[in-house]
Amino acid sequence: MILEKEKKPKQQIPTPITLTKFYCQRISIMSKPDLVSRDYTIHLAKYTHRITFKKKAPRAIKEIKKFAQKAMGTKDIRIDAKLNKFIWSRGVKNVPNRVRVRLSRKRNEDDESDEQLYTLAQLVEVDGFKGLQTETVNA
């Protein structure tokens, strides 16, 4: 009588690369300062390409919110009225190709809100987009 060995599922052994990636993400999340403002250039044409004409401006607003959520790490994103008017300035289908946005992480004054911080997206008016990079603004 031959006894068969039980096959155990292989455990994934964490490699140094995955561990480093994990710890870097943890450190970056934990070490984010509360209040910070940064200027970003968002390439809206990239996000609204091949989108139905009647949905281009609403999609651009959604993409700005998604970009801000990823960049600042807050779920609560608020769009300034000037930025909204700039996106809609040429109508629903002719969205500007690029927009310079100042994303400011601020403390939430509402006691009832789940989030402690929110991000305010404001328009930064520039002459041209050539050579612009992400900048931290001291406000």
Image: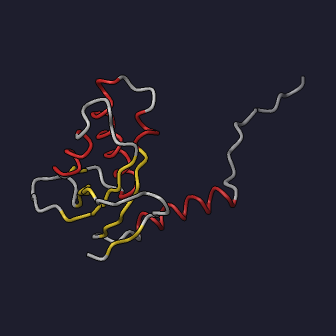
The colour scheme of the drawn protein is secondary structure
Q: Relative to residue 92, is residue 39 drawn left or right?
A: right
Q: Position of residue 3 (x, y in %)?
A: 85, 28
Q: Relative to residue 100, is residue 10 drawn left or right?
A: right
Q: Is residue 48 above or below residue 131?
A: above
Q: Position of residue 50 (x, y in %)?
A: 45, 26
Residue placed most toward the observer, 121 or 74: 121
Quadrant in the rendering for residue 23: bottom right
Residue at 41%, 55% (x, y): give it.
Answer: 41
Quadrant in the rendering for residue 34: bottom left
Q: Position of residue 112 (x, y in %)?
A: 10, 53
Residue at 63%, 55% (x, y): give it.
Answer: 18
Identify the image quadrant of the N terminus. Answer: top right
Residue at 68%, 44% (x, y): give it.
Answer: 11
Identify the image quadrant of the C terminus. Answer: bottom left
Q: Is residue 81 above or below residue 30?
A: above
- Number of labels in the image equals 0
Quadrant in the rendering for residue 126: bottom left
Q: Is residue 136 above or below residue 115?
A: below
Q: Relative to residue 42, is residue 25 drawn left or right?
A: right
| Residue ranking furthest to the right | 1
Residue placed most toward the observer, 112 or 96: 96
Q: Is residue 27 above or below residue 99?
A: below
Residue at 26%, 30% (x, y): give it.
Answer: 92
Q: Position of residue 97 (x, y in %)?
A: 40, 43
